[in-house]
Amino acid sequence: MADHKDIDEQSWQALASAAITVRERAYAPYSAFAVGAAILTTDGRIFTGCNVENATYGATSCAERTAIGSAVAAGAREFSALCVITDVEHPSAPCGICRQVIAEFCDDLPIMMINPAGARAFTTLDELLPLRFSGRDFKFSR
């Protein structure tokens, strides 16, 4: 089981800094709910993403999925930590769709949720999505 203590404080700080920076680029004209995310690969690279809203909402891309997509486009497939920043009193966890996308690449993942006021909360993918459906549920192996 993943644990946030498996990631050193310097790495968490780097992820937080990257997420804070990219959140400023969020496109959220409908909800005004700007989100930033930074994901750490197992080889030490950090990829970021912000939410990009659309008038139809269903076409909105969440920050976490944008970060993962950026990482995948650069060839990354293995991740060791994720940081998400939202501007709410209690730091927010990734939405259900983002949880499922994270599960496509990780059996478990430590996640830090922060807000601009400095609040931090930690969780794991296992805690957020304990009985997830993933590629391992198919009869073939990948």
Image: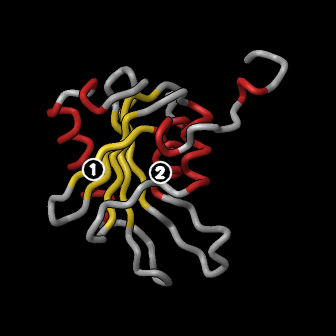
**Left or right placement of residue 70 versus residue 21 in this view:** right
Amino acid type at circle 1 is Ala
Q: Residue at x 50, y 35 (%)?
A: 126
Q: Quadrant of the N terminus?
A: top left
In the image, taking residue 44 as reference, residue 134 lies left or right, namely: right
- Residue to which mark 2 is pinned: 64
Q: CA gap, disc 1 to disc 2?
A: 16 Å
Q: Are marks 1 and 2 in contact (CB under 8 Å)?
A: no
Against 82, is 91 above or below?
A: below
Residue 129 location in percent, x, y? 56, 43
Q: Which mark is residue 121?
A: 1
Instruction: Kindly identify the amino acid type of the residue bearing the numbered disc 2.
Output: Glu
Question: How many residues crowd around disc 2 within 10 Å: few (fewer than 14), some, or many (20 or more)?
Answer: many
Q: Which residue appears farthest toward the right when viewing the image?
A: 139
The correct choice, above or below, for 135 with respect to 115 in the image is above
Judge left or right: residue 5 versus residue 33.
left
Mark 1 secondary-structure assignment? strand
Horizontal and vertical percent position of residue 70: 49, 43
Q: Residue at x 27, y 50 (%)?
A: 121
Residue 54, percent from left and from top: 59, 75
